[in-house]
Image: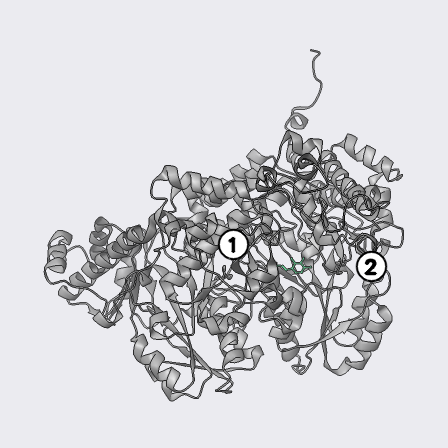
Amino acid sequence: MSFETTRLAELADHDAFIKRHNGPSSDDMARMLDVLDTPSIEALIDKTVPSDIRLGRELDLDAPRSEAEALEYLGHLARQNRVAKSYIGQGYYANHMPAVIQRNVLENPGWYTAYTPYQPEISQGRLEGLLNFQQMVMDLTGMELANASLLDEATAAAEAMALCQRSNKKRKSKTFFVADDVFPQTLDVVKTRAEFFGFELIVAPAATLAEHDVFGALIQYPSASGELHDLKHLITQAAERDIMTCVATDLLSLVLLKEPGAFGADIVVGNSQRFGVPMGFGGPHAAFFATADKLKRSMPGRIIGVSKDSRGNTALRMAMQTREQHIRREKATSNICTAQALLANIAGFYATYHGAEGLRKIAHRVHRLTTLLATGLKQAGVALAHDSWFDTLRLTGVDAGKIHGRAMTHDINLHYFADGDVGLSLDETTTAADVATLFDVLLGSEHGLAVGVLDEEVIEKKLTGIPAELTRESDFLTHPTFNRYRSETEMLRYLKRLENKDLSLAHAMIPLGSCTMKLNATSEMIPISWPAFAHLHPFAPRDQVAGYQQMIDELAAFLVEVTGYDHISMQPNSGAQGEYAGLLAIRRYQAAQGEAHRNVCLIPSSAHGTNPATAAMLGMQVVVVECDARGNVDVDDLSAKAAKHSDALSAIMITYPSTHGVFEARVREVCEIVHRHGGQVYVDGANMNAQVGLTRPGDFGGDVSHLNLHKTFCIPHGGGGPGMGPIGVKAHLAPFVPNHSVTPIAGVDAASGAVAAAAFGSASILPISWAYIKMMGARGLREATQLAILNANYIAKRLEDAYPILYRGENGTVAHECIIDVRPLKAESGISEEDIAKRLMDYGFHAPTMSFPVPGTLMIEPTESESRYEIDRFCDAMLAIRKEIDSVTAGEWPADNNPLVNAPHTQADLADDNWERPYSREVGAFPSDAVKAAKYWPAANRVDNVFGDRQLVCSCPSIDAYRS
Ligand SMILES: *Cc1c(COP(=O)(O)O)cnc(C)c1O
């Protein structure tokens, strides 16, 4: 080998990651450009992105870092965090995530890269996991119905308030009651929501509930101070006065406490975090939401239900989707879209693994240690605020300063109430030795208490903090699912069995338009498991979270540069939540200008359902703007409507490039029109993947955008969450982004309430986006955007003769996604977009986005991470399917018996002795060479949606039902 003359600096491969993240090689690129008959990628971009909005320079970011360098730097940041022992409680508790779940679910791309289970035939594994979660919540809360997760406990409580108001037909008051000892972060979020729903809040002691004329009430059980309210009394009194009750609760406590459902609660909410999910400095974890059966049609969020497939076998799917925002838009029950599916699955598996007897052991130990602590404290003369408890005590009349000093020397965090009381919550990780240390901290070292002696006393006197009338009597987790997987071997196989039913990015591309299913690189994922990121309490003292703060500040600075905005709020934990925070900032800003009356929100007809649903939650009047024949916002219609509503115009919500997959050339004009009429411009940032490094919403007229970090910035979808939806705002809106009552955020108006339970939302997944940007650098990010656009145009080119491309830009190109129109084909063949979607499963692919934003179409988004090989494989499948459709049209196959309408094909089909089909088994199940080489089997035949909605079952079916 000849001597290399390369400089050492160049030998270090700083940009190796760019080639790993971006699918096409430079050879691929050249060949794809050839097919497009375009000389260069720059020429393609010039044709696609309007020149008057081009950035014209490289983003000002650091040079790309290698994976090793990025991890090393993140490790350095992690070491600035200090993991103290947390007894803060207040909704967040340390716990032991079972290692078998950590490795096989949390850290397993088979689970975390899957999409929301809209295609049930290839999602039966996570659907079963989520059904377990629902069953667990129903059992522990004693309710008839539970959904498959919400974003956090605080937003769940806010949703509960809205649900009470919608459903309470007897009491039409506009006032909601909140007990004064709910978690402060919950009260904060409920306050924010109430303001724009136009509700009054009464915050008072729980015992006074029945004195007020209110439509509903929120009670915490156990309370933030640890007290166990007499739910029977409170709920009965409320019911007599037609007040609906919502109980915020803790799942572990319900193992020992009488379940709220037994007292007649209408709604029960809470956080499942302590079931195996790390605190993560605030998230992500799955909130739960359970109701009485009568409220099922107005339940927010997704519900997994039991149905059957075309063979009559039990099959799961998402139920009652017609309630959701993508159908009901501004009339939807809530704007929730991305929730916390991965974390709900983990919490459900925690219950599956431990079973009722395991949970009882954990709950008993926590309660016993708390009782022991309470007994010792009382003996030492410390006054407790309450004589009931599960795991939380509140000490009154103590010297908080002294306790704080001693706690710090032991690296222990306690909860310090504003009035000088000290609170603490024990958890699964607490040991007898920890309690001994707590005595030292709370009493000073001279206390003379011995844990062993106290334990004898607790046993002898049968001491407990749970009043007899609040003691649980009913069974829970009796279903076989919760009783089978006690050994790790069995659990491992159960998790693997479920994983194998699902199609994820580990199998094939998932070309879902608007969802940006790109690579979630392993090195981006690794830091989320590090204790220094995973084990921090969101209310930990600021000097213990310096590494987090710096990482968040750096990520915010990256995103400021990427978007052209002035400030980022990292609080919203989904795109829809970001929309809420963004419109909220607009409304607060306008109110501060004396323009609180502005409440009209213009929304193009192509918008995602979350847009109108969010506007409605802020009490805005949605006015729909039409699109023209090319799919663009109809500027004349916009002008007319902006003029008509000029006095009341608050905002427009546009998506850019539009959900039609096109960069609208007149976007600047659209923004100017709205500004001229006194409105603000909300740019839905779900499509940032087509903008990064090429154009910035903050430059072409946007005032605020949310960014789906779980789309463009590499946080995995987790089968329907987690996500993060931070917002970028212009300087004038910066004071009005959400604040937080427990951990105030610098630079934000103190009066701006929270939209999420934690100040920085789901902070523990932010290292993923940080690492992505760090490893790509300005050039890598720009190339990613260019390749996303190239890949989409290449697909449009390859498919255009077989399927008409619905919308294109002025120069005939598409943006980062393209819509193919299936309606003409359907008219001549009877084959629908759904048949194509299901047939793609036989070819080993997930379907593109179906019937959004245009009914009867498929929207394809490849992302930059897919190689030409994979894209060709997908296009080949789509073209082969087109030939199959032609065979139906030509009458070679009957319209009601062909590989398309019978798709997907399962192993059950192949094993069936009665193969009564006009095509071979091979055509059915092995239609391409690729699947002959490696076959992914759909776990169910076509699932019947109507059947499942007619007979709604959202609990685990008996095992016999699975066999039938
Ligand atoms: C995904 C998406 C949203 C909603 O984001 P979530 O994180 O699911 O709440 C909003 N608008 C558009 C255009 C989207 O694609």
Q: Nearer the viewer, mark 1 or mark 2?
A: 1
- Confirm whether residue 562 shows in the render: yes
Q: Quadrant of residue 830?
A: bottom right
Q: Report the front residue among 245 and 194.
A: 245
Q: Are marks 1 and 2 in contact (CB under 8 Å)?
A: no
Q: In front: 442, or 379?
A: 379
- Residue beneath disc 2: 664
Q: Which mark is residue 927?
A: none
**Quarter of the figure with residue 708:** bottom right
Percent position of residue 254, x then y = 32, 63
- Going from N to C along the chain, the mark reached first, 1 or 2, is 1
In this rendering, position of residue 144 left or right of residue 23? left
Count all numbered tags in the image, as a single digit. 2
- Residue 749: percent from the left, percent from the top? 55, 71
Check disc 1 and report its element: helix, strand or loop. Answer: helix
Examine the image and state in which quarter residue 225 appears: bottom left
Quadrant position of the N terminus in the picture: top right
Q: Is residue 327 above or below residue 928?
A: below
Given the image, on which type of amino acid does mark 1 rest? Answer: Ala
